[in-house]
Amino acid sequence: MSLTEDKLIQMYTTMVRIREFETKVEEFFAAGKIPGFVHLYIGEEAVATGTCAVLTDKDYITSTHRGHGHLIAKGGDLKRMMAELFGKKTGYCKGKGGSMHIADVDLGILGANGIVGGGGPIANGAALAAQYRGTDQVAVCFFGDGASNQGTTQEAMNLASAWKLPVVFVNENNGYGISCPTCKSMAVADIADRAAAYDMPGVVVDGNDVVAVYEAVAEAVDRARRGDGPSLIECKTYRWRGHFEGDACTYRDEAEVQSWMAKDPIKRLREKLLEQGILTEDKDREIRDAIARELEAAVAFAEESPLPAPEEVLEDVYA
Amino acid sequence: MPTKTYLQAINEALRQEMERDPDVFIMGEDVGPFGGCFGVTKGLYEQFGEKRVKDTPITESAIIGAATGAAAAGLRPVCEIMFVDFIGVALDQLFNQAAKMRYMFGGKAKIPMVLRTPQGAGIGAAAQHSQSLEAWFAHVPGLKVAMPATPYDAKGLLITAIRDDNPVVFLEHKLLYGLEGDVPDEPYTVPFGKAQVHREGTDVTIVATAKMLHTSLEAADVLAKDGMSAEVIDPRTLVPFDTDTIVESVKKTHGLVVVHEAVKHAGFGAEIAAQVAELAFDYLDGPIVRVAAPFTPVPFSPPLEQAYIPGVDDVVTAVKKIRA
């Protein structure tokens, strides 16, 4: 599969956009401007980017507590995302959801999710709707290594397989469920092995290689659109930050973090694109400047937007 | 008016809504050719086929999640959980996902799904197949909760539930499936949040749900023989809840007895009692009394089970206690 230069630049841009957004969030969270919890996606950008680059606006995703990257990659608007994180009325959820519940149903984003393993059954439902209507839409369920052990995830994979639903289960294995390393939480080395239990393809990809992710997902999406059912793709990756902002990360050593930072998915793609002449230093600066401006506008929008009025607490409970 | 059973009324509501709207479909355990564990979906598979009457594996989370996702994508799923007791393994998909999506997303999603499930004791099915758990659902903002007590309401409330744009938990009482009553052939709706006064009276208000409505109506007959006039009201839906009808009744009768089959402790009767106490305390001339199951799991052996389920005598005694 050969990716066009435009597609590669687009994926590079998306990864940088995610990284820069998350870096800003880190800053504002530390400054006390963002209430609640945030779980940053820094280091895992290639997974969301490579996956969503295969999808259209009509396709669905279910995301996770570490969801900012998925939303940006699926086309989420940075202004409304940032405003939501600030708890503002102009945010995606009018300040009712925050980091863990950002959704844009019009873009097929059926929500980040505060419950580990919550998304699989819902992704199935969206895929079922596509199958029911005979469209060629697919649903991608992003889930972590922690979620892979939840019963909901296993139930979802079984049903998707039994009904040949157009779902792609994209596992982001970042090595830790909060503080617990995968070697303590599961006996298998590869989560992808579990696909065999459901008679679906299961592949392991380098989750820090956006092109590898794209190619694996493209194949799975083709299969799903053909009506041949779900696939499981395990993307081995790493989160540079803690589980949440404020996590002291006492459970992992600095050498491990450094070794993964050396495998920075953005740096890797950048070097490759520079080497191939697809990207130039000038072009890179242009991309980064544009993202900086976009983020500046998002932050200004978030800061200047009004907070919700207390009486809005009662709105949107029922349709 | 034609006479039908409660079960036939539910079946007819499903059939007519599926005929009316191609987005309505059914899924659940054994709902297909088998016709459902209690026979509620009988004949629907034959009429609508596998696409619209889907047998699922025994995976309640996957069932409710599939309904939630399909509803978010615009369909109108009606899923069945074979016994309400099985909701325990799937509660997250209902109360953290389906119920909250609209609010969490700032009003940007609609989840028009119905979860049908039978509850109630009386067939010797013991502790994991006999509970009445309506209070659990009524405690979750974002869910609507319907509890039909008659064949007429079963059909009309289910049609309303299917047309509603919110997740609705539709609680059927398994001992009422054989109950006969008047049910029009044509489709009709019974509005949510509108209690029904089944018997007018002047001396005491009895609020009763599901099978306890019938127990309470029998009790009202007994009380009438003793010269006491009981008003018997079925709220029909717990969310939304028709406080007004009950408060108005209490203002007239000055007494309230609440009857339900769920355990008394932290049951929905406590909510009804509290609302009346808040809004009509000055009209009460005695304490509010609740008649409900004791705080135990549902027992198996028939004498134990019968001791567990509130009976006519319990309601009569409760009324006499405040009207002595």
Image: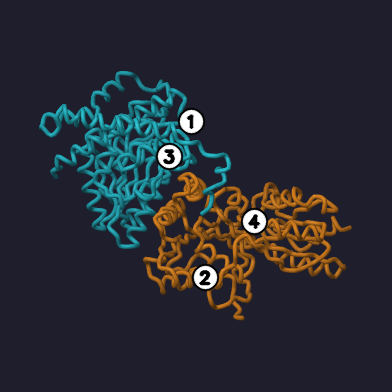
Chain colours: A cyan, B orange
What is the crowding at mark 2: few (fewer than 14 residues within 10 Å), some, or many (at least 20)?
Answer: many
Corner quadrant of residue B317: bottom right
Decide which of A44, B90 is in the foreground and name it. Answer: A44
User: Mark 2 against mark 3, which lies toward the viewer?
Assistant: 2
Q: Which residue appears farthest toward the right when viewing the image? A: B324
x and y percent of residue A86 in the render? 45, 33
Chain letter, disc 3 residue = A
Marks 4/3 same chain = no
Name the amino acid, label 3.
Answer: Val
> Relative to B89, is A282 on the left or the right?
left
Name the amino acid, label 1.
Answer: Pro
Q: Kindly report the distance in space between the C-alpha atoms of the residues bearing marks 1 and 3.
A: 21 Å
In the picture of the structure, the residue carrying the numbered disc 4 is: B241
In the picture of the structure, the residue carrying the numbered disc 2 is: B13
In the picture of the structure, the residue carrying the numbered disc 3 is: A116
* SS for callout 3: loop
> Relative to A128, is A90 on the left or the right?
right
* SS for callout 4: loop
> Relative to B70, is B129 on the left or the right?
right
Please tell me which residue is depicted at 22% across the width and 35% down the height of the picture: A12
